[in-house]
Image (cartoon, rainbow, N blue to C red):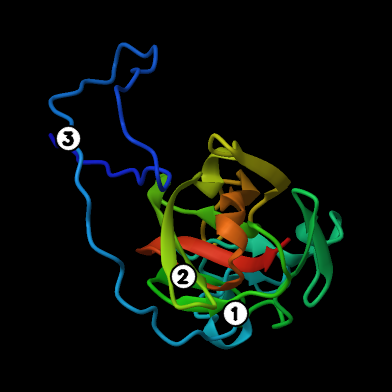
Amino acid sequence: MSIYGEVYPLPQGKTLSYITMPSVGNMKLFSVSTDNPGPLPPAPAAQSIASAVNNVAVSDDSNPGAGDFDGSGNSYSAGALAKYGITAGGKVTVDGAQLTFPSQSPGTANAVASQGQTLSVDGSGHKITLLTAANNGDILGFLRVNYTDGSSEQFPIEVADWYSSNPAPGGSLVATTVWNQRPGNNTPHTVGLYGLTVDTGASNGKTIASITLPSDGRLKVFSAAVH
């Protein structure tokens, strides 16, 4: 059995007065406190998503054994995703933003397994949209947003397990398809691909330069854009 801690950043300039608990009887709270941590250290040098891909998340239907999104040899079907207009190097509309799906061919590394990488992002604005999914459980973590002036902020995110085909609160379902199974696995199942949008609240006119992912390899990122 486990007991967990959660940290949530407060908006700048706000003073916490009290918290209101959600109406769920299976959540137990032992303690709550506040702190004023110092500024985040400088963000690592950013790399493009294209250069950071390290997970074979999509495989061709003729060679499903090449994929391994979840560490168990299962992956998204390139043919099934194509029915949603999601193809290598193609444009995908996610939460109103135009994202570019990785251009790598199915069966090769075509997603970023989250290990704390800092990724450059294109576009301008105060919202960041990701095309993403998780495996082996939902992901709760922080997305670090880095600005051109050298400052950073952290925003809590939640990404659902692809196996559920049900986005986490605040997320959206971009596609739901039958997965490509590892050879010898005869249990077809529907999996989801999700959108997640983080609103930085304009951040006092700052310009977003990059994002730093959580250090949890179960989280996979296909694309990201600022808008």
Of badges 1 and 3, the one in the foreground is 3
Residue 200, image x and y in percent? 56, 53
Viewer-nearest residue: 125 or 31 = 125
In this view of the protein, can residue 180 be seen by the observer? no
Q: Percent x, y for residue 180?
A: 63, 60
Residue plotted at (59% across, 79% down): 49
Q: Which numbered dot is residue 49?
A: 1
Residue 5 position within the rendered picture, expressed as x and y whole percent measured from the top left: 20, 41
Q: Residue at x 36, y 14 (%)?
A: 24
**In this rendering, the label closer to the viewer, 1 or 2:** 1
Earlier sequence position, callout 3 versus callout 2: 3
Mark 1, secondary structure of its residue: helix
Which dot marks residue 33?
3
Query: Label 1, label 3: how many angstroms apart (C-alpha)?
Result: 37 Å
Task: Determine which of the numbered discs, if any, sits on residue 113 in the image.
Answer: 2
101 on left or right of 57? right
